[in-house]
Amino acid sequence: MSRLIVVSNRVADVTKAVQSGGLATAVADALQEARGLWFGWDGTVVSNDTHIGISINQQGNVRTATVPLSQRDYDEYYVGFSNNVLWPSFHYRLDLNLIDSKSIDGYRRVNQRFARALAALLEPDDLIWIHDYHFIPLAAELRALGVKHRIGFFLHIPFPPPDIFLAVPEQQWLARAMFSYDLVGFQTASDTQNFIRYVLEQAGGEQVSDTELKAFGGTIKVRPFPIGIDVEAFYDMAHTPTADEQIQRLQRRSMASNHIIGVDRLDYSKGLPDRLRAFRRLLDLYPENRKAVTLMQISPPTREDVQAYADIRQELEGLSGAINGEYSDFDWTPVRYIHRAVPRATLAALFRGSQVGLVTPLRDGMNLVAKEYIAAQDADDPGVLVLSRFAGAAEELTDAILVNPYDNDEVAQALQRSLTMKKEERIERHNALFDKVQKHDVKNWRETFLNELKSSRRANESG
Ligand code: GDG
């Protein structure tokens, strides 16, 4: 069996991966099975380039190889290009796209440095799986060093339509770099189509078959691979005696009989201010919900060095304060806003104990919270998922109440409909959603991607 090499911006502690969610859970098992190597940034920043060395650690079957970033790399590659250009643009927020030529140079430089460090660690049969927008050009840099291994790429965030991608600096260089992979995976069919459209319309490419795309002198495989979660593990976490007790406490301590829950990193792509405005509309339009409903919004801090994140925090604190100021009573607080990370098991219990899961990103690659909310429910008395049409998850989870997250009245109506929905309809919708979440779970995602990668080989005219 070939060894699996996973490359991602941050390398998680493999022993704790199952508790931390997202990418960590998604790839940790595959690494364990394949006695793999996980390569990436160790999360530290050193003051100058001379201290940069690679650290190798063994955690069970998995080796981790990590490097620090210099302050300049952190500013230019991580904050600059990755989070101030690619993240906003790929989430359709060109207004937040801060183009700066130094950050592009830093992005290129770090990808080159990572390629050199990784190339030195490779063994002949290794299968390489590169994750996310931080590393789009990594395969091209590896190829430039003579690496001939099979290399796959998975983009966790959306891929925007051509008109938006055209506003990304050096977009043609990025698109060409995608053709150094053997397999490129996106979250949804529409992300895949957006990439194909760019290649056909702007790069003179040609679609060879459903999944094969030819451009820039090469032919690669391109396909959606919707990411999932470990459904059983999440269900179990929501059904422990501690979870039962937490749910009882949630209900006992609150005057409200209905709970709406939102859980998202505090990111402008998650639609949090609009979510709070929609909740305020619910209280305005349907006053019977006053003293009867609470919105719990858990939003741990993230990327605090980026100005747009400081702005969203201020906006959210202002809004939740304003709603509470206007509507609270001595025995009821409508919004509970928690700006801290909560243990994963507590999240699972809160999902199960809440009658509505409110997931309203303005744009999201997939959104695992939507799937976690479904996985945590009791099948005989489930809650209702209200989900943004602009989350990748909406492509699969069509039995949720799908909403336009920009339209506060529409979301308020969807909340009212969910809070008053008959048990029969709730069960019917939940059965359909649970089936989909279970069918496309994380194991399925990982195995489908890796099997496809093993049988993919890009054709390259330049050899
Ligand atoms: C990116 C893409 C794509 C959140 N708060 C806490 C906490 N979380 C966990 C959730 C979930 C994970 O973090 C977040 O995953 P999402 O998918 O919702 O969103 P992103 O972080 O933006 O992830 C996204 C994903 O990659 C995977 O491809 O779906 O579209 O943007 O598991 O539960 N976990 C704990 N405490 C918290 O306070 N323990």
Image (cartoon, rainbow, N blue to C red):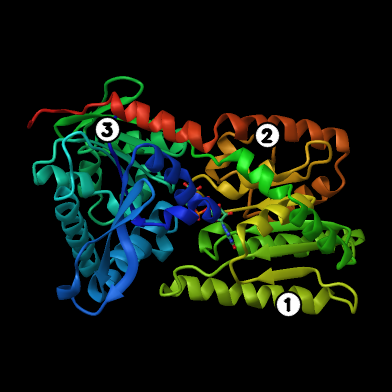
Badge 3 marks a residue whose secondary structure is loop
Q: Does mark 1's beta carbon lie closer than 8 Å to ligand 1? A: no
- Give how far across and how far down residue 171 sits, in percent: 26, 50
What residue sits right under mark 3 in the picture? 2
If the image is split into quadrants, where does the N terminus sit? top left
If the image is split into quadrants, where does the C terminus sit? top left
Circle 3/circle 2 CB separation < 8 Å:
no
What residue sits right under mark 2 in the picture? 433
Relative depth, front residue between 228 and 404: 228
Count all numbered tags in the image, as a single digit. 3
Above or below, 329 relative to 153: below
Above or below, 53 relative to 432: below
- Give how far across and how far down residue 421 sits, in percent: 85, 42
What residue sits right under mark 1 in the picture? 322
Relative depth, front residue between 14 and 169: 14
Q: Residue 312's quadrant in the figure?
A: bottom right
Residue 317 in the figure: left or right of residue 244: left
Q: Is residue 410 visible?
A: no
Q: Residue furthest top?
A: 209
